[in-house]
Amino acid sequence: MLFFVEVILPLSLAKTFTYSISEAEYHYIKKGMRVAVPFGKSKVYTALVIETHQNQPTLYDAKEIHQILDEFPIVTEIQIAHWQWIASYYMCAIGDVYRGAMPSALLLESETVISQKTDAFVDVSKLSDDEFLVYEALQKQSSLKVQDVILILNKKNIFPVIQKLIDKDILVLQEEMLDSYKPKLVRYIRLHSKYESNQGLGELLEALKNANKQKEIVLTYFQLIASEKKPLTVKKLVDTANSTSAVVKALIDKEILEDYHIQEDRVNFIGQTREDELQLSVVQQKAFDGIRDSFIHKEVCLLHGVTSSGKTEIYIKLIEEYLLTGKQVLYLLPEIALTTQLVGRLRAYFGNKVAVFHSKYSNNERVEVWSQVLKNSEKAQIVIGARSALFLPFANLGFVIVDEEHEQTFKQIDPAPRYHARDAAVVLAKFHKAKVLLGSATPSIETYFNASTDKYGLVEIKERYGKVMMPDIELVDLKDKYFRKRMKGHFSDTLIEGITNAIALGEQVILFQNRRGYSPLVECMTCGHVPHCQQCDVSLTYHKHKNQLRCHYCGYSIAKPTHCHSCSSVELVTKGFGTEQIQQELVSLFPDNQIGRMDQDTTRGKFGFEKIIDSFKNREVDVLVGTQMLAKGLDFDNVSLVGIMNADNMLYHPDFRAFERSFQMMTQVSGRSGRSEKQGKVIIQTYNPDHNTIQQVTKNDYTGMYKEQLYDRQIYKYPPYFRIIKITLKHRDYEKLKEGALWLYQVISQNLNIPVLGPEEPAINRIRNEYIRTIIIKIPTTISIVSTKSTIQKMLNSFDSVAQYRAIKVAINVDFY
């Protein structure tokens, strides 16, 4: 009898692969375990078993697996089903989903290791200098990695040298799997057992009577043990005694103290949980009851509550109910910055039941959360995370919250799988028979459409928590202010007066500008030349702090030029403005105050967000300038003024969602103002104060915006009436791309009786030296999307089989908005 396993490889391959196993392995291996398998000439990958069977593959001979990596499945059957749904709905390879879903520490890849042949005879005189250096290094250590050889020889192309040594029969290559997860060990200290009796203590003090530093450490040890009554770490002992680890080492050598290690979780919470009950206001209670009622008949409910209406408290109450039934809860947020603030709030209620999962955590921390969720451990009853938390192996999921569900960051853009976390979460909940709550002050039009057509439940809260007034919104006409010369830099007199008043009262200010850097372009006044990125079709953004021009697409940078590259004129001026310029202008306008900035440049580190949010919350910063990171659900009780520097940037974006996005962004930013007793103020600077969308923001008229946008969407064939699939083609050769894109467009439009647009050159038509063309397919909701997708997939397969187009990269983005 022959036995086989079917596996998914972590490569961009749409199909599964069959490997042969022994009978004993066949009875041991379960669905969801990982196995190491050979693939290609000499590579080894971590593959995921999705079934065991006895059907021999007809097209190829099945290779044997190398080893089994798990003792029990680490991926659940529901997860595999969900991943297959994502692969088919978003038209990507199952291998992409597997690679995107697993923490990379669980996806071991082989690293080539070089070692010397044990019985080789070496004539050193016949080796070249490079070969001798490698040989010499192998005398000092048993094996080297490719990376080590690159460092030893200080050059990149080292394979010829290695190849020659292999040919001379001196080296062997072996592929070995390296486990990159190491448990965190913490070093503790205790008294040696022989000193534990009273008589022993007398001897101890006698032995230390002349060693004062050692005596001090021992006395501190007794104090801490008496007061804390829990194991004592070496670090704490050294810090409390104000001593050094060398003194501790001397005591260990004398056999007075002994050290030992305990494996600890990397992410630990120490703090008090609240004993008092959370009291909801009358309005909140009504919404809470409404959500519970809607869950009787519907799987999904939308909570549409104005900013600062206390949605988080309602979530906490609902989570409490689900925890009592022993279910797990998933809480998705659009931005890592938000998890920082929320984790504190939830841990105050639920203590150590909260686990956090997002990309700023290290590999090892993510593996720990993965295994806690899989075991349904006490520490991971509530998982908070950004979109990737969706892929965790939930054992018993009962409730999913998607907060700020309208946010575009829930959509993964690159690499595949290009999924939308909100939609994928609704499907995941269906697999688990769990309920979903979508929360937002400005729901996306598709979600609100689903709620108003009775597909989802709908609960609305129209007033802020504690009867706090909605902020007062004032529009400033920039045309008029510039004409009357009432501008200082990019600040109108109205905004400067507002900031001055707020700071005088000890209140804080948030300023929003959705561009980072100092200014978006540098222009020559003589010939009009603008420095562009060499690899992308975009102008370079000027960053003053580093005195360089940077491309925000590929990271290319040059020092700021002193003269024009085209005509050598020295008259260079910067046009437009970003957060960095606003911050500098504020520093000169308000020299005595602390000005902070929050954008992608200032939040790069693991705790980048925490530092800025904490310093703002602790009132160390008076004015915070930021990009859209500020617009998302952050809660600061001392902000009385929000300024939007230029509202027109967002409105005139070439995107069918520009007005909807602008409304959401401005309303969300405005919602950061006046969240305690006093009414907040919002000042919006714009050249178009009469624009419909800006007027809707001032009146907080979501329904007006929704109806107007819905009317447009129906006429111009956009969601929610049509589904959109965007196909992006990329290639370095402009002509070949143009020809290939046209071929694909013609095939698709001939075979599908629905609107197909393209092949279009996008506004930015070259990134990283690759030209881009897009084709957009609009599928009406009346047509089956499954059959349309399979037709499209067939056409893409035939495109791939045309030899001259094979080098063109094709990316498919379903629901790209």
Image (cartoon, rainbow, N blue to C red):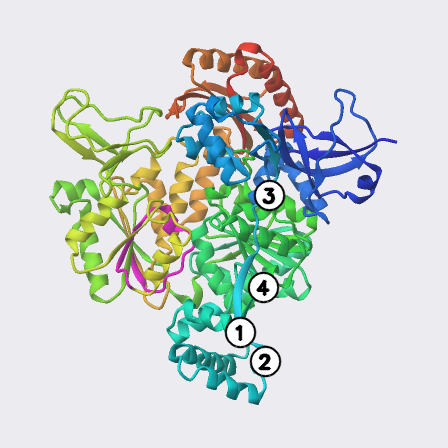
Can you give x and y, in whole percent of width and height, for residue 220 in the image?
Answer: 44, 80
Name the residue beneath numbered marker 2.
194
Cβ atoms under marks 4 and 1 closer than 8 Å: no
Can you give x and y, in whole percent of width and height, for residue 335 in the image?
Answer: 45, 49
Cβ atoms under marks 2 and 1 closer than 8 Å: yes
The amino acid marked with disc number 1 is Glu
Q: Which residue is nearer to you in this view: 464 or 104?
A: 104
Name the residue beneath numbered marker 1.
255
Quadrant that contains the N terminus: top right
Name which residue lies at 45% across and 51% down.
336
> In terms of sequence position, does the residue under pointer 3 or pointer 2 come before the other?
3
The magenta segment: 620-641
Name which residue lies at 54% across and 71% down.
258
Q: Does residue 729 appear in the picture of this structure?
A: no
Q: Which residue is nearer to you in this view: 274 or 42?
A: 42
Name the residue beneath numbered marker 3.
102
Can you give x and y, in whole percent of width and height, for residue 714 in the image?
Answer: 50, 32
The amino acid marked with disc number 2 is Lys
Task: Determine the CA span between mark 3 and mark 2.
Answer: 49 Å
Q: Nearer the viewer, mark 3 or mark 2?
A: 2
Q: Does residue 45 appear in the picture of this structure?
A: yes
Cβ atoms under marks 3 and 1 closer than 8 Å: no
Name the residue beneath numbered marker 4.
353
Q: Residues within 10 Å of mark 1 (few under 14, many from 20)?
A: some
Task: Determine the CA span between mark 3 and mark 4.
Answer: 22 Å
